[in-house]
Amino acid sequence: MQVKEILAIKGTVLYTIPPDRTLAESVEIMTEQDVGSLVCFEHGKMVGMLTFREVLGAVHARGPLWQQVAVAEVMVRGPLCAGPEMEMDELRRLMVDHHQRYIPVMDGGTLMGVISFHDVAKAVLEEQSFENRMLKAYIRDWPEEKGG
């Protein structure tokens, strides 16, 4: 299974935020949309990624002043990206090796979507369930041997 197939299952709704916005605004968007990451765009280009991990780090470091912190101060600049043709196994390895729960999918300079570790786990389950059903159907429809 390729990354583009995971995006097709998930959908390609994108949640973005400019880097000059505050963490309070980002938390509001993340909470309302029930997402764990936002892609940071400036002048039509991806410049970073903000996840709940960076928000929590700012809360810890800045205390009660965290809400006024600009996204640009804590976002991950130049995040790891996947391509739409990348195989799911390679994506899983990338996420595990680099401890990333969210990976933007880029096709050249175009953001196609964001894949979460949850999306990958769901795709694996669906793929295994499909294969399981096919194997059971194959076994059930196995031709009987004719006596001779």
Image (cartoon, helix red, strand yellow):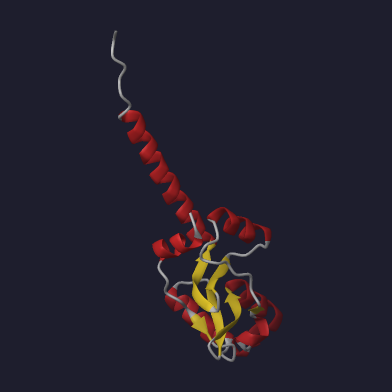
Is 82 left, or right, of 148 in this rendering? right
Q: Is residue 64 above or below residue 52?
A: below
> Residue 69 appears in which quarter of the rendering?
bottom right
Q: Is residue 124 above or below residue 112?
A: above
Q: Nearer the viewer, residue 51 or 107?
A: 107
Residue at 59% in and 91% down: 20
Outermost right residue? 61
Residue at 61% in and 85% down: 71
Residue at 52% in and 85% down: 17
Q: Nearer the viewer, residue 130 or 28?
A: 130
Q: Nearer the viewer, residue 31 or 139?
A: 139
Is 61 left, or right, of 31 in this rendering? right
> Residue 135 appears in which quarter of the rendering?
top left
| Residue 16 horizontal/vertical position (percent) | 50, 81
User: Could you tell me how many numbered marks the image carries?
Assistant: 0
Q: Nearer the viewer, residue 49 or 6?
A: 6
Outermost front residue? 148
User: What is the quadrant of the C terminus in the image?
Assistant: top left
| Residue 83 horizontal/vertical position (percent) | 55, 67
| Residue 31 horizontal/vertical position (percent) | 47, 76
Is 14 left, or right, of 98 in this rendering? left
> Residue 55 appears in which quarter of the rendering?
bottom right
Q: Is residue 101 above or below residue 52?
A: above
| Residue 132 horizontal/vertical position (percent) | 40, 39
